[in-house]
Image: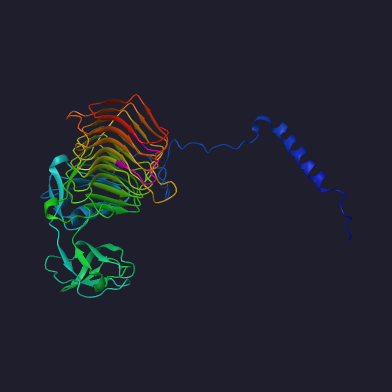
C-alpha cells in the first residue's frame, strides 16, 4: 500500500501543537499544572536509606563510660572508641564520659551521627608523654610496615606520626598511622605508607596524635568535656595534622562547652570542614592556635568562646569564607588575637573582646602568592580591642592589597601609655577600607594610612 506524503509542514505542525496546548489550558482552568518547589516534609518517617529526613526521636541509645562504673569500664582511648563505634553501628547515639581522667595512647576517631558528652571539668581526656625514635630500614611507598631503632616505649595500638624529608623534592613528609602488629622492633601499620620513608630522608617515628579526630564524617556533637594535651611532656605537632581536636573533610560538627588546653600545637583545628560550630568553649594555653578554621572551610561559627594565652586566638587559614566570629573573649595571645589572610573572604567578626595581644590585635596578612589572595570583603564590627603589642604595637594592621573591608563601630584603646603605638594602620597597597564610628584612644597615632590617595 502506498501512503501519500502529508501536506502538513513543520510550521503548521508547531502551530497546531501550540493551539492544542492553549485549548487544554483553557479547558483545565484551575487544574493546570505549574512548576514549583517540592512540598515541605512536615511529618517524616524513618525510611530505609533516607539520611536527610528522620523523626526527632525522644530517646536514642546512650552508653556510659567510667573508670570504675558504667556500661563500659576503663580509662583508655580503646574503651571510648569501642563505645562510639557501638552506638554508631546502631545508627547513632550518645557516649557519656563519667567523671575521671582518661589517658590516651592514640586518637579517638569520631564516627558520624554520634554525640560525645562529658561530665564537665571532672571528665578529663589527656595523653602519655610523647616518644620519638629513628627508623633503621628503608620503607617504600607501597609498604605497610616499618622498623624502629628503639621500640621500647611503643605498643601495638599506639597512634604515631612518621616524619622525614622527601628524597625526591626535599619537602616534608608527614604520615599518621596506628601500630597494629609487631615482631620486636618491626611494626605493621593500619594502612600503607603511600610515601617513601628512606633512610636518606632521616625518617623518625613519634607518638604524636590528636586527642579527638575524624575524616569524612558528619553530624557530630562534642560537649561538656576537657581535653588536656600534656604540653610540657609532648613535642609540638603542627596544626595541619594535630591538636586537642583535629578534623579533615568533615561536615556539621558542633563543639559546645569543651575545654581544649595545654596542647603542644592547636586547641581546635579543622581543615576543609563545613558548617563547624565552636560555641562556649575555652581554648587556652596551647602552644599554637586557639581555634584554627583551616583551609577551605566554609561557614564556620565561632561564638561565645574564651581563647586565652595561645600563640593566636583565631587563625583564619586559606579560603575560609562566610564565617562568623562573635561574642568571644580573646585575651593574652602571644602573637595575634585574630589573623586573617589567604583568600579568607566574606567573614564577619563582631562584638568580640580582643585584649593584650602580643603583636597585633587583628592582622590582615599580606598574601602575595597570586592575583588576588587577600582577605577581602570582611567586616570588623563593634569589637573592643585593647592593649595590643609592645611599644610599637598596632591594634588593627591591614597589609598587602587587602580591599573592600569594613571597620565599623569598634572601640580601640590603649591604657599603657602612647609610646609608638598605632590604633589602625593601613598599608600603602591596600584598597578600599571603609571606616565609620570607631572610637580610638590612648595611641601615639590613631590612624596611620600609608595609601597615597587615601
Of residues 99 and 397, the one nearer the viewer is 397
The reply to whether residue 89 is visible in this rendering is no
Model colouring: rainbow
Q: For residue 347: magenta?
A: yes
Of residues 350 and 96, the one nearer the viewer is 350
Of residues 105 and 295, the one nearer the viewer is 295
The residue located at (22%, 34%) in the rendering is: 420
Q: Which quarter of the figure is the C terminus placed in?
A: top left
Q: For residue 282: magenta?
A: no
Of residues 430 and 191, the one nearer the viewer is 430
Q: Is residue 251 left or right of residue 235?
A: right
Q: Position of residue 174 (x, y in %)?
A: 27, 62
Write down the region rendered in magenta. Answer: 339-349
Against 362, residue 144 (above or below) is: below
Q: Is residue 17 left or right of residue 439?
A: right
Examine the image and state in which quarter residue 44 appears.
top left
How many badges with numbers are in the image?
Answer: 0
Q: Which quarter of the figure is the N terminus placed in?
A: bottom right
The reply to whether residue 47 is visible in this rendering is yes
Q: Position of residue 104 (x, y in %)?
A: 16, 55
The residue located at (68%, 30%) in the rendering is: 29
Amino acid at each position: 500500500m502506498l501512503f501519500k506524503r502529508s501536506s502538513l509542514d513543520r510550521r503548521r505542525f508547531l502551530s497546531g501543537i501550540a493551539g492544542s496546548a492553549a485549548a487544554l489550558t483553557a479547558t483545565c482552568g484551575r487544574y493546570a499544572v505549574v512548576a514549583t518547589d517540592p512540598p515541605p516534609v512536615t511529618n517524616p518517617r524513618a525510611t530505609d536509606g533516607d539520611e536527610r529526613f528522620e523523626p526527632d526521636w525522644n530517646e536514642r541509645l546512650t552508653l556510659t563510660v567510667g573508670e570504675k562504673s558504667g556500661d563500659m569500664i576503663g580509662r583508655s582511648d580503646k574503651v571510648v572508641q569501642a563505645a562510639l563505634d557501638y552506638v554508631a553501628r546502631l545508627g547513632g547515639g550518645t557516649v557519656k564520659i563519667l567523671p575521671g581522667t582518661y589517658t590516651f595512647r592514640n586518637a579517638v576517631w569520631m564516627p558520624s551521627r554520634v554525640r560525645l558528652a562529658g561530665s564537665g571539668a571532672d571528665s578529663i581526656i589527656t595523653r602519655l608523654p610523647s616518644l620519638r625514635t629513628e627508623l633503621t630500614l628503608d620503607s617504600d611507598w607501597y609498604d605497610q610496615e616499618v622498623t624502629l631503632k628503639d621500640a621500647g616505649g611503643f605498643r601495638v595500638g599506639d597512634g604515631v606520626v612518621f616524619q622525614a624529608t622527601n628524597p625526591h623534592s626535599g619537602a616534608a613528609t608527614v604520615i599518621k598511622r596506628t601500630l597494629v602488629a609487631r615482631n620486636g622492633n618491626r611494626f605493621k601499620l593500619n594502612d600503607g605508607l603511600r610515601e617513601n620513608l628512606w633512610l636518606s630522608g632521616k625518617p623518625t617515628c613519634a607518638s604524636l596524635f590528636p586527642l579527638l579526630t575524624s575524616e569524612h564524617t558528619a553530624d557530630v556533637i562534642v560537649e561538656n568535656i576537657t581535653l588536656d594535651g600534656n604540653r610540657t611532656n609532648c613535642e609540638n605537632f603542627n596544626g595541619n595534622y594535630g591538636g586537642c581536636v583535629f578534623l579533615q573533610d568533615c561536615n556539621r560538627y558542633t563543639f559546645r562547652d569543651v575545654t581544649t588546653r595545654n596542647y603542644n600545637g592547636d586547641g581546635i583545628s579543622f581543615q576543609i570542614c563545613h558548617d563547624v560550630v565552636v560555641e562556649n568553649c575555652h581554648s587556652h594555653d596551647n602552644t599554637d592556635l586557639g581555634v584554627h578554621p583551616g583551609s577551605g572551610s566554609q561557614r564556620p561559627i565561632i561564638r561565645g568562646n574564651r581563647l586565652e594565652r595561645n600563640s593566636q586566638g583565631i587563625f583564619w587559614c586559606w579560603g575560609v569564607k562566610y564565617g562568623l566570629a562573635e561574642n568571644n573573649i580573646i585575651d593574652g595571645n602571644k602573637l595575634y588575637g585574630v589573623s586573617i589572610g589567604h583568600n579568607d573572604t566574606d567573614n564577619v567578626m563582631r562584638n568580640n573582646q580582643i585584649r593584650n595581644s602580643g603583636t597585633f590585635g587583628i592582622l590582615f596578612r599580606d598574601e602575595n602568592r597570586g592575583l588576588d589572595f587577600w582577605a577581602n570583603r570582611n567586616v570588623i564590627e563593634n569589637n573592643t580591642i585593647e592593649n595590643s603589642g609592645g611599644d610599637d604595637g598596632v591594634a588593627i594592621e591591614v597589609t598587602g592589597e587587602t580591599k573592600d573591608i569594613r571597620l565599623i563601630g569598634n572601640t580601640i584603646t590603649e591604657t599603657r601609655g602612647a609610646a609608638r603605638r598605632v590604633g589602625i594602620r593601613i598599608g600603602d597597597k591596600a584598597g578600599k577600607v571603609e571606616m565609620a564610628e570607631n572610637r580610638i584612644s590612648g595611641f601615639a597615632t590613631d590612624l596611620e594610612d600609608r595609601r597615597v590617595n587615601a
